[in-house]
Image (cartoon, rainbow, N blue to C red):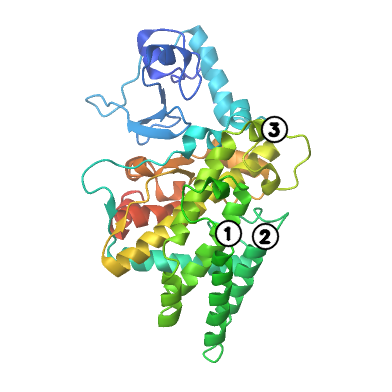
Amino acid sequence: MSDSAPQRRWACIPCTKAKRKCSKQTPSCRRCLEKKAVCRYPAPRITPPYDLVFSQDGAVSVIPTPLSDDGNPLLPAPPSQVGGQQQIQQHQQIHAGPSHPAAGTLLNPWFLSPASWTIDHKTEPLSSHICFVDETLTYFIDKLHLWLKQWTSKGHCPFIHPQLWRVHLPDCIQDAFTSLAAYHSKTPATERTVLRIVENRVNSLVEGQNASSAGDFGFVMLDPAYHLARTQALLIYKVICLFNGDVRARAQAEKHIDTLDLWAQQMWQSASLALSSDHDKAPLDRVSNGPVDTQLRTDGSLTSTWQAWIFSESIRRTYLTATLTEAVYLTLKQGWAPCPGNIMFSGGEGLWEAPSPISWMTCLQENLINTIRGVDAEQLFSHAKTSDVDEFCHAILIAKYGLERYDRWLNEKT
């Protein structure tokens, strides 16, 4: 390609239109921050045309670019020579190889921002209730069972990362794994025995906890890894018992119907509290052996940032899976369920499956879509393809918008 090819704009749209120098920072350049304006950057591709909007918590949204009468995107005047240099610098930031990751991504990742741990609740009438159609309920339940089989056969699934418990395997996770493996290998003759084992394990897990409400900060302040482990374990037992079809198993699981939601909320509060702690913001003083060691911290290196992302994303995905599982079951029982709220999570294709820090960073830099906020997920239908996001994101979108809307998106983008 010739070096004389015309460059597209790289400064933000407000600065370009005002013919002012843009500092090029995200989520907002210096001028837009001072002007309290929405800082918008042109997308790296224009088919379909849209602009990227970075919010203060690091989330990325997409909005359509205005079109001219001939259907082409309206572009501002060509950048100045200074703008041309900015174009080169921003192009290097976006497309740099894994050996040159952006410093901001490693030192100040969005998933370690306290603002990214807020839960959005819509305020419109009837928004506090959600309903699912029968096909969506069946799809999500089948997905849960498929994910648990994948965990026992491959050691990972869309909400349990293969690196998560590599260093330390908590007792409750060990119990859940062995119980699940026994459940998957049961026969008609052993099914009753296996379900009794599961019942005893879940009762022991729940009875070993003393917190009685989400406001019990004695438990909220415990290690986030502890919260994550017990929530994942209880989620596994719930999937086995609630959707098994056995009357006794379902009745026993209903005794703790609110516990999974409570633990998920406490897990979320614990992570948010950890990020506000000076201890967790301090630089790491030792070499990390795994994501549970670093938890919600990074020393700025690629490896520690990847490990912190694994831990953060595991909490986010476990929270979403747990709250949606409760919502699906309540809908089966009473026709509706309380809306659990919307959170931010990573849904970009390849991120969760990346086997190394380098491959993770490569996906992060090359993907069109990485970070998704549940409340804005509908924009994906207009501005992304199904191949841009992973299996977990597909399941969340189907649970939120239904199979019919998902199938229409699939057909529109193929």
The answer to whether residue 125 is above or below residue 50 is: below
Q: Report, in whole angstroms, how far the alpha carbon at label 1 lies from the one at label 2.
A: 9 Å
Drawn side of residue 309 relative to residue 286, left or right = left
Q: Amino acid at mark 3?
A: Asp
How dense is the environment of label 1, judged by Cα within 10 Å: few (below 14), some, or many (20 and up)?
many
Mark drawn on residue 230: 1
Q: Identify residue for label 3.
A: 299
In the rendered image, residue 206, in percent from the top left (x then y), is placed at 54, 65
Q: Residue furthest bottom?
A: 189
The answer to whether residue 119 is above or below residue 331 is: above
In the rendered image, residue 364, in percent from the top left (x then y), is placed at 56, 39
Q: Earlier in the sequence, mark 2 or mark 3?
A: 2
Residue at position x 65%, y 35% from top? 280
Mark drawn on residue 69: none
Drawn side of residue 311 relative to residue 367, left or right = right
Q: Nearer the viewer, mark 2 or mark 3?
A: 2
Name the secondary structure under disc 3. loop
The answer to whether residue 30 is above or below residue 380 is: above
Q: Earlier in the sequence, mark 1 or mark 3?
A: 1
Q: Quadrant of residue 343?
A: top left
Mark drawn on residue 170: 2
